[in-house]
Amino acid sequence: MFSVVGIGLHISQRSGMPWWPWRGVRAGLVTGLLLISGNFSQAQTSSTRIFGSGANQFSIDFVEIGNPNNAADTTGAPNPAGSVAYVYNLGKHEISRDMITKANAAGGMSITMQDMTSNGGNGTNKPATGITWYEAAKFVNWLNTSKGFMPAYKFDANGNFQLWSSGDAGYDANNPYRNSLAKFVMPSRNEWYKAAYGSPSGSWYDYPTGADTVPVAIAGGTTGNTVVYSQSTANGPSDITSAGGLSGYGTMGQGANAIEWVETAYDSVNDTPIEAQELRGGAWDYDNHGISSSYRAWSPPGYDNFFSFGFRVASADLNTPAHSLEVINLTPALGSVQGRETILKGRRLC
């Protein structure tokens, strides 16, 4: 059940708005702010979270990944992959250079990025690349602590990554990397894979564009079944909001642009602080195999010399009861994109 607390309508362009704007369910011309209380785990929705303040404020758009307890894919790598027992949210886009710069300033961090002057430039909306796994984890920790939540990953006083132990609040014996009380995390392999190659219907695709046909290679854009790949190394990645067509769930750029760290160790067991970590999706200068569900790579977690290493963020907090009174973006992630229906408690939204 849900209750409507208040509503306000106005005409708006697609530009971002503070907090949780939602655009009209028809052609996107009329938008409104709806303050509601309830659980929307059955709807495919997109939401925005604001971090920092003043000159260091930035936002991250999230897409809800529903269909909990879905059957795993058995055609990709590893086999099986992609089964997730719960509803969660994944960043629609990769983390940008601007987000890292502002988080560094707001949080007193010193996350470094690769100088991309010779590889397409250092535009603020380009994906943050040259990032280590540890730096991605520290960025995620700041997202949590800046809002009063538990950090997702444990670092000692010297900045060394550690496993959570049984005496720590939020310890999860099934995954000692991730604190269960954290709200923002690096996506696990299965969380990342499901959003990239899965769909609300449970179907699986070979490519992160909601299709089994090889995507068209582009330098930038948002046309369906396109991916930023097969580009020259000097070309560099595209802006995170122009990184190709959407996945079946509505994420962008999980194929190429920047190859992305996931939380999961390459051997599938998060049991030691220093081990090879998995990367997925390929980069702008990869071929079509690199963007397929059959491709995965690995690297030591402290390695940052490869200029294509980036990441995105997952969230578990946007659908929890503790955050049920919010202004939520009710735009169906798929309804207006691919013509699929999105249902909210039995009511059609598109």
Image (cartoon, rainbow, N blue to C red):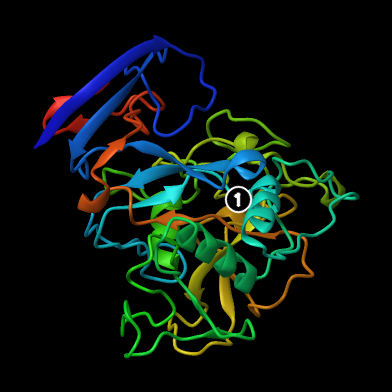
x and y percentages locating residue 154 in the rendered image = 49, 79
x and y percentages locating residue 348 in the rendered image = 19, 24
The correct choice, above or below, for 77 with respect to 67 in the image is below
Q: In the displayed structure, does residue 121 sit left or right of residue 101?
A: right
Q: Secondary structure at mark 1?
A: loop
Q: Which residue is mark 1?
A: 95
Residue drawn at x 30%, y 63% as measured from the top left = 83
The correct choice, above or below, for 58 with respect to 268 in the image is above
x and y percentages locating residue 45 in the rendered image = 33, 36
* Count of picture labels: 1
Q: Mark 1: which amino acid?
A: Ile
Confirm whether residue 225 shows in the render: yes
Q: In the displayed structure, does residue 127 sit left or right of residue 331?
A: right
Q: Nearer the viewer, residue 28 or 54?
A: 54
The correct choice, above or below, for 172 with respect to 204 in the image is below
x and y percentages locating residue 59 in the rendered image = 53, 41
Which residue reaches farthest front?
54
Q: In the displayed structure, does residue 333 sit left or right of residue 34?
A: right
Residue drawn at x 31%, y 16% as measured from the top left = 8
